[in-house]
Image: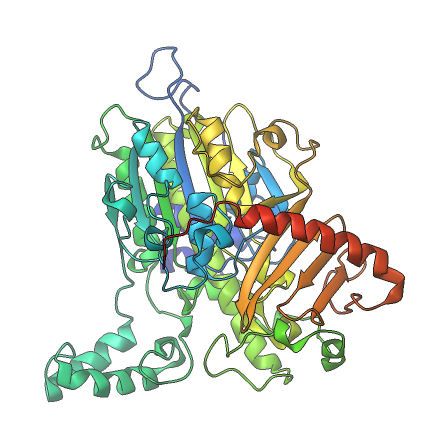
Amino acid sequence: MLNVNFQVSVLLGAGRAASWILAAMLLPGFVLAVEPPVVAATGKGTEGKRRTPNVLFIVSDDLHGHLAPAGYPGIKTPVLDAMAKESVTFRRNYCQYPVCGPSRASIMSGLYPESTRVLDNSSRIETSRPGTTSFPMAFRQAGYWTACVGKVFHRELDNPGGDTWDVTTWNQDDEMPIERRAREVFEAANGPISDPKNKKAWASVHYALAPQTRDQGVHGTKGYGIGPTGMADELHNDAKDARQVVRWITSEERGDRPFMIACGFHRPHIPLTAPDAYFDLYPRESLVFDHDSLYDWFHRPLIAMPTKPVQPGLPPYGNEDVERRRNETQAYAACVSFLDAQLGLIFETLRQQGLWDDTIIVFIGDHGYHLGEHFMYGKVMLFEESNSTPLIIRVPGLTKGGISVEFTELIDIFPTLAELCSLKAPSHLQGTSLVPVLRDIGTSGKGYAYTVVAREGGLGRALRFDRWRYTEWPSELDRELYDLEVDPRERKNLAWDPAYATIVLKAHELLAQVRRNAESQRVDTGK
């Protein structure tokens, strides 16, 4: 067992709450208990009159849905665990496209990718569907003070239409000690690394310093950063983002207006780096895996793989590199626990300010992520690991904890928040309000979730319904059907088994209906 006092001393200066949370994570059987708010539910500064609810929207980059609040043990998230006790956790929630840009365009607009026409990270909904109202824009139009920090839309400092945010800002990690020392030596010999003539040489030096300093192939190198940074929490961009949210919550900048604050955490997107103490939570030798077999791919169409490597420097397809998988799983888990601790700072501030019972909180990931499952890493696939994503919604006075097993989609967030906050929802919305499920987790929903991904020749379209995942790829011969109840790892494709012909026909007809709906709000821009 790790020494708790040592861990806390490592994080001094990172914030009292984050330090305490990390230390508590190390205790066997630890459960974080949330104390009742110290301020009455009417909120600070009010006299018996409940104010218009604030909204805190939190999105984590590349975070899959297999977290403890949804019933999957393994990653330590005491803050989210505690929040879930006052929330509804949607266990079968799915993204609409397993890549950052398209997924976020759908989340923010409430539209399926066929209607946003954003199918890659370079497209923008402002061009593909001009004039589309996003949910933060709708809040601002309704009189809310809106603020954004980090990656919420796909690009940094993105303010679609110029009238989405009252304020938006972006933070970066500080230099790691190993980077700083190397830069000082390099600049003493060659001049500033910002000098154009030095950029290529510095990139080569930087990449070779340590596993933590590898880039994402931007400079023609392979690999990406992974490992502990040697820095305290507050020197990382996600910690800076959390502290910015704290400043907004405690400031007078918004006046008397309710707030809609969006916080976009970078982690656990690559590079998979975090403070050392979070890595210590997950000893590599303790990590075990359910290994796949190449035989599984005899049942699947090869188009189910990405058209190009998701990440540079990966082992050849089909090679189970156990050591690499341990490294990546450890780093991914460390990043998630790190961001969970940062949430603790925000939530503690809401309580201290008397705003905990006046603030709706939505926590999501933008899409899932593979860590060696099916011999795959990253995203851009239609497997559960790539498409399943967390959705936890806390509404003061309404949600009382529990897990919903209804199918939900990230496009459901816009109509849900609109109903909760009495906003007039735009007519284009294709999502479904989850308010009935928030009131009663036993309430039935729409009964399916729909995800697409681009391949040569068109889109692959996946539909989850009942106990099934059914997928049609551009070629009619490339189909998949998995029984997720008996085969949650999606190892045996049943699409061409005669015993399942009736299910395939039903799935095909339902998918056709959902596809027509997904395309129904497409706007022809003439481009």
The quarter of the rendered structure image containing the C terminus is: bottom left
Residue 503 visible (yes or no): yes
Residue 191 position (above or below residue 15): below
Q: Residue at x 35, y 77 (%)?
A: 215
Q: How is the image coloured?
A: rainbow
Q: Residue at x 57, y 39 (%)?
A: 84
Q: Is residue 237 left or right of residue 320?
A: left
| Residue 328: percent from left, percent from top | 52, 72
Q: Residue furthest right?
A: 499
Query: How many marks overall?
Result: 0
| Residue 439: percent from left, percent from top | 61, 26
Camera-side residue of 66 and 437: 437
Camera-side residue of 86 and 488: 488
Camera-side residue of 346 and 441: 441
| Residue 493: percent from left, percent from top | 77, 68
Residue 490 position (above or below residue 321): above
Q: Is residue 255 left or right of residue 133?
A: left
Q: Residue at x 71, y 67 (%)?
A: 479
